[in-house]
Amino acid sequence: MEEQKKTKIMFVMRKPPHGSIYAYEGLEAILIMGAYEQEVSVVFIDDGVFALKKEQDTKPLGVKEFSKTFAALEDYDITNIYADRESLEIRGLTVDDLIIKPKLLEASEIAKIMEEQHTLLPF
Amino acid sequence: MKFGIMIQDGPYNHEAADSAYNFIQAALERGHSIQGIFFYNDGVINATKLMDPPQDDRNISKRWSELGAKGIDIIVCVAAAKRRGINESVLIPNARISGLGQLTEIAIESDRLITFGSS
């Protein structure tokens, strides 16, 4: 069988990890789509960058702590992981504060990558 | 053009379900096709047949079921549905419960995937 062309799908993670379910169910979608052998990438923008913050403690909230699962993305063959440099800076964060090391990009670079995508999935 | 639709918000509280429905109607009227409608997050609540709004209000789940009767594939994410108490016993006619693999298929097969509900 002829090898099919992979579809470029980018998850755009904009919302904070807690306060709504978007980041968590977004992560679930990323993990499953990663198994479909498409070209899946993830970008963290705005409050979405907080999802990657080290040492989260969700016990007082009574919700599952899922940030560590982001560290497993590479095991799911999702290696194109980006974060908006300015979103981190505005929030007083550096890469050292994060559980993984996303590639930091300027907004204009992210826009360029978004243009190359077939599908953008916002969470 | 082939459109895929993802709906991430529930009915009534916000406009997402209405906007999606209006978009789909407009697209169909102009001769476009809908590859599939995928309900995710609170969007799965759109698919309960127990919905019973006042008579002078629109019945959002019934509208989805009617689109399903026209042959449009209406898919409810199983993981999101289980969280929110949506299963086969409350599912609207002409819809089906399946996994995120279906969203992947819709994304691949559509020319454009349009999302309603998440800002």
Image (cartoon, coloured by chain):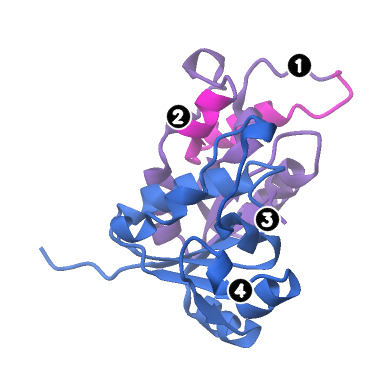
Q: Colour of chain A?
A: blue
Residue type pointed to by label 1: Asp
Q: Residue at x 75, y 26 (%)?
A: B59
Of labels 2 and 3, the one closer to you: 3
Residue B81 lies within the magenta run: yes
- In this view, the residue farthest toward the right is B56
Q: Which residue is mark 2?
A: B97
Q: Residue at x 38, y 47 (%)?
A: A32
Q: Residue at x 54, y 64 (%)?
A: A98
Of labels 1 and 2, the one closer to you: 2
Q: Which residue is mark 3?
A: A15
Most foreground residue, B40 or A11: A11
- Label 4 is found on which chain of the structure? A
Q: Which residue is mark 4?
A: A94
Query: Which disc, if any, is residue B1?
Result: none
Classify A81 as above or below A16: below
Q: Secondary structure at mark 3?
A: loop
Q: Which residues are magenta?
A: B54-83
* Tag 1 near tag 4, CB within 8 Å: no
Residue B43 position by quadrant = top right
Q: Secondary structure at mark 4?
A: loop
Q: Residue at x 60, y 81 (%)?
A: A111
